[in-house]
Image (cartoon, rainbow, N blue to C red):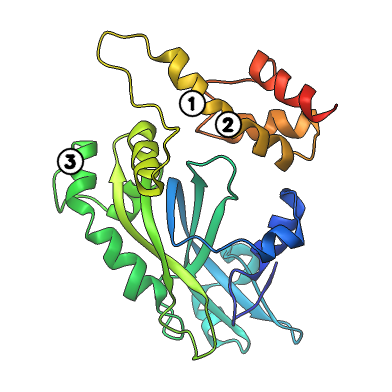
Amino acid sequence: MTYNLDNPNEHETLVDIADHAYDAFDEAMTDEPSMFFGCVEIQAYRAIFINDGSGWNMSQYVPEMHGTEAEVNKADGKFLSTQIDFNITPANAGLKMIQRSMGAKNRKRPEFARVVRPSIEALSDEIAKIKSLQSGQFNPLKELSGMWVAGEFVPRPSNKEDETWTTLKFTRVFANQDECIEAMNAHYNNEDYDEPAEEGDDGHNEDKTAMIPFLPPLWEQAEHDRDKMAALLTENPLLNETFTIESPEVVAVMGEGEE
């Protein structure tokens, strides 16, 4: 993977174009969101950067392949870094996955140290409460992975005057998916949102009905391909407990798209 030091998320554009139905007119007329709501997955790993003369390339560090840390540190055009990858599956199934990759201790782009890490640390008590952990006795970055969250897209500290790159500032954590969706709809004042069923009521049908509007955008994202639709449903934590590719609601959406 070619790694652009000026824009470490440049590869996302290629992924988005490959994985999502893309309309340049829609993209040009769509405002960039200021908030995000979804399920975050976090990976932390040792990476090696190698400049082969054409640019910097990043890959996961394997001592048997790249040499010992001492050997790498002595070599020209190579350096090691602790990398953090954030992948956020939006609560709104019609939105694209949010991906960010950053160095944990990058002095030139200190977005993790100055923005992301402090925002996660500020949520430590809430994480502890939700997961029944003892405050101060766990790694909040590790425990945040797999949780439903909300946050803001904020400018990267390293931006130059004419740059608008953003990074992630986490502002809330939720006990479950339903709480996240409720907060998302409250934020966007979505009048179509169905309040959770009262205790003792069978809210399954109501919940299922509330999920149906997310299916048409997913069908467009799958480019009207049944196999892609099945894969997207399986991977989507918002929908995979409610729908399968054989669900009547899904079949109906795919049928309408083929007319």
Distance Cα–Cα, label 3 vs label 2: 33 Å
- Is 168 displayed left or right of 132 in the figure? right
Q: For this rendering, which residue is in front, 162 or 97?
A: 162
- Depicted 135 relative to depicted 85: above or below: above
Position of the N terminus by quadrant: bottom right
Any part of residue 48 in sight: yes
Residues at circles 2 and 1 in contact by the CB criterion of under 8 Å: yes
Residue where numbered disc 3 is placed? 129
* Residue type highlighted by circle 2: Pro
Residue where numbered disc 2 is placed? 213
Residues at circles 3 and 2 in contact by the CB criterion of under 8 Å: no
Q: Which mark is residue 145?
A: none
Q: Identify the residue at horizontal 78%, vertical 29% (top origin).
A: 227
Q: Quadrant of residue 75?
A: bottom right
Residue where numbered disc 1 is placed? 210
* Residue type highlighted by circle 1: Ala
SS at mark 2 in the image: helix
Q: Identify the residue at horizontal 24%, vertical 46% (top origin).
A: 127
